[in-house]
Image (tube, helix red, strand yellow):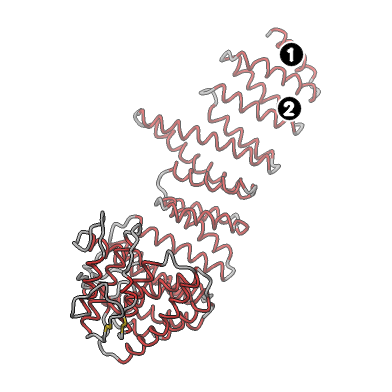
């Protein structure tokens, strides 16, 4: 099982990526048959690496004396590969031979590799107390290993990767079972020995993910000084990968991963409340990303990172109590996430926009207007505004909804007038006509909705103006819709005792109904006119309306 980790193609892997890459490499090998796996030959092969004589599985208590460096490296490599493959095929249950547990091992690195294999294959059946017992076996081994590595000149990358995997699996298990004192002891031990992991810095595919995990555990334990120490190592690692991996022929996706390391470090500072260092590192990462995006035609991955950076700058502003700036960034992140079809980022952005809606000011409408220029399609712009307005309507934040609705109407009005002009002077086209009708109906509906919101905000004058604009759109093209809108305006005016204006709008509706012979509307309109004339004390008009109603 040759993984050749020392010459592994440089990638900044997550633990899952690393496991999957190894598993895919070994999956088609002759290690075992997935349909009927027999693990006995695997254990024999494994033990053959460190023991010269063939291993008899029935023999118990066999002594494994200290081995040379190359055998230790090969054994560690085998364990990493085999456990990755077992985790990849997680539905399999591995039974380790009893004699394997009773081996006497003098070499701590070999012992901890075997313990890692055993823990991996049995962690699903371990009780919490058993997990703690296994940890107490491992801790003194780790202490001796770190002492040994400090004194050695030659440290293999396989050994460092195994130690990282041991940290991950034990920290996760202990944390899950609430053994936080043990988590803290393990955390301190590793942070005190972080220098050892810098040996193969940029070549180690798991080092960045290991650093991230250490930082998150430190933040949970509120070990600020040790978190800062870890961040120093992260900066050292960033400098190493920039020096060795960033060049003109490098794959753009790997460059993005390196920029993400820079961005991740900036977030660590923010988690510690250090807004200054967060802003410095975020600015560097953002500028670097912009320059790279100018060179390569990136798709979702780059835009996702860009969106995260914008949202992170919003978090920074929130920490500084710069609430207007904070909300502006959240709105901008929402626009980017929607435009580039990033569902997870969109959900997060809309969550922050809703959560901090109390920071919304009228000035944010202009910021949103500018941000929407990123979206070329008018209907997409209005769809985003519709989704945004829906959020505020649910929470009854009508003073915000009206601003969003006004902006939507403004965008649709501009598109409607542009299309109207285009159809008037250009050649007639079926698709253009269909698009125009779609925009026209959407514009009218949103004017109607704007009027409804204004009514709820007790601003009838503005609401009536919105309804009048809606009526102008349809006019004689759609008399039934125009009549409905005119009567809605008339009723609204009548409700506010503006009977003269109410009668004018109702008369307009009556003339349209008469002209287009919409008989079912004529009687209703006349009944309304009679009622309005009575209330407005217009006797002459009242007599005329009664006469007309009698004729009908």
Q: Distance between the residues labelled 1 and 2?
A: 15 Å
Is 124 positioned to the left or the right of 8 in the image?
right
Quarter of image, res 530 = top right
Closer-to-camera residue (418/429): 429
In this rendering, position of residue 351 left or right of residue 254: right
- Residue 118, position in %: x, y? 36, 71
- Quarter in which the C terminus is drawn: top right
In which quadrant is the N terminus drawn?
Answer: bottom left
> Is residue 108 found left or right of 180 in the rendered image?
left
Q: Which mark is residue 500?
A: 2
Q: Residue at x 53, y 41 (%)?
A: 409
In percent of the image, x 18 and y 79: which residue is there? 53
Q: Is residue 210 visible?
A: yes
Give how far across and how far down residue 158 sits, in percent: 27, 77
User: Residue drawn at (45%, 70%), measured in percent from left and top?
Assistant: 172
Label 1 packing within 10 angstroms: few (<14), some (14-19), many (20+)? some
Q: Viewer-proximal residue, 544 or 364?
A: 364
Q: In the image, is residue 417 above or below residue 153?
A: above
Identify the secondary structure beneath mark 1.
helix
- Element type at marker 2? helix
- Measured as percent of width and height from the top left, residue 280 is found at 44, 75
Which of 264 and 93 lies nearest the eye of the viewer? 93
Q: In the rendered image, which residue does mark 1 sit on?
A: 544
Which quadrant of the structure image shows residue 264?
A: bottom left
Q: Earlier in the sequence, mark 1 or mark 2?
A: 2
On the image, the x and y values in percent for residue 169 come to 40, 71
Compared to 181, does 405 lie above or below? above
């Amino acid at each position: 099982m040759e993984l050749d980790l020392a010459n592994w193609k440089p990638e900044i892997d997550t633990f899952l990526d690393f496991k999957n890459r190894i598993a895919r490499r070994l999956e088609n090998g002759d290690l075992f048959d997935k349909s009927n796996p027999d693990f006995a030959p695997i254990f024999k092969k494994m033990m053959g690496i460190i023991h010269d004589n063939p291993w008899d599985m029935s023999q118990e208590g066999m002594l494994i004396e200290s081995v040379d460096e190359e055998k230790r490296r090969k054994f560690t490599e085998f364990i990493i590969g085999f456990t990755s493959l077992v985790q990849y095929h997680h539905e399999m249950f591995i039974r380790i031979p009893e004699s394997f547990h009773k081996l006497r091992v003098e070499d701590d690195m070999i012992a901890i590799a075997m313990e890692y294999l055993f823990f991996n294959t049995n962690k699903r059946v371990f009780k919490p107390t058993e997990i703690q017992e296994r940890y107490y076996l491992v801790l003194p081994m780790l202490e001796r290993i770190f002492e040994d590595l400090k004194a050695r000149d030659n440290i293999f990358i396989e050994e460092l990767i195994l130690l990282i995997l041991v940290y991950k699996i034990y920290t996760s298990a202990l944390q899950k079972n609430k053994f936080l004192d043990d988590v803290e002891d393990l955390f301190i031990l590793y942070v005190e020995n972080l220098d050892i992991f810098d040996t193969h810095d940029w070549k180690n595919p798991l080092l960045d993910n290991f650093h991230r995990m250490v930082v998150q555990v430190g933040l949970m334990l509120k070990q600020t000084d040790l978190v800062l120490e870890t961040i120093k190592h992260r900066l050292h690692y960033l400098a190493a990968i920039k020096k060795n991996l960033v060049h003109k022929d490098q794959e753009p996706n790997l460059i993005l991963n390196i920029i993400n390391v820079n961005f991740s470090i900036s977030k660590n500072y923010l988690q510690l409340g250090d807004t200054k260092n967060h802003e410095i590192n975020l600015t560097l990462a953002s500028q670097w990303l912009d320059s790279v995006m100018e060179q390569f035609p990136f798709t979702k991955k780059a835009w996702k990172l860009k969106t995260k950076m914008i949202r992170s700058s919003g978090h920074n502003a929130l920490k500084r109590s710069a609430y207007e700036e904070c909300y502006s960034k959240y709105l901008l992140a929402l626009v980017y996430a929607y435009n580039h079809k990033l569902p997870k980022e969109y959900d997060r952005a809309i969550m922050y926009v809703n959560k901090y809606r109390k920071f919304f000011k009228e000035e944010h409408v202009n910021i949103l207007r500018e941000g929407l220029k990123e979206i070329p399609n008018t209907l997409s712009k209005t769809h985003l505004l519709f989704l945004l307005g829906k959020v505020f309507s649910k929470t009854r934040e009508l003073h915000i909804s009206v601003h969003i609705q006004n902006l939507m109407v403004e965008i649709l009005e501009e598109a409607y007038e542009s299309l109207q002009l285009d159809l008037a002077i250009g050649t007639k086209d079926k698709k253009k006509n269909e698009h125009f009708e779609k925009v026209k109906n959407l514009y009218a509906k949103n004017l109607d909705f704007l009027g409804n919101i204004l009514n709820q905000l007790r601003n009838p004058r503005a609401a009536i103006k919105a309804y009048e604009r809606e009526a102008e759109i349809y006019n004689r093209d759609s008399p039934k819709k125009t009549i409905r809108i005119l009567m809605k305006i008339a009723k609204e005016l009548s409700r506010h005792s503006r009977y003269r204006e109410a009668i004018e709008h109702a008369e307009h509706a009556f003339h349209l109904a008469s002209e287009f012979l919409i008989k079912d509307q004529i009687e209703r309109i006349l009944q309304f006119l009679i009622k309005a004339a009575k209330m407005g004390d217009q006797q002459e008009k009242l007599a005329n309306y009664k006469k007309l109603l009698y004729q009908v």
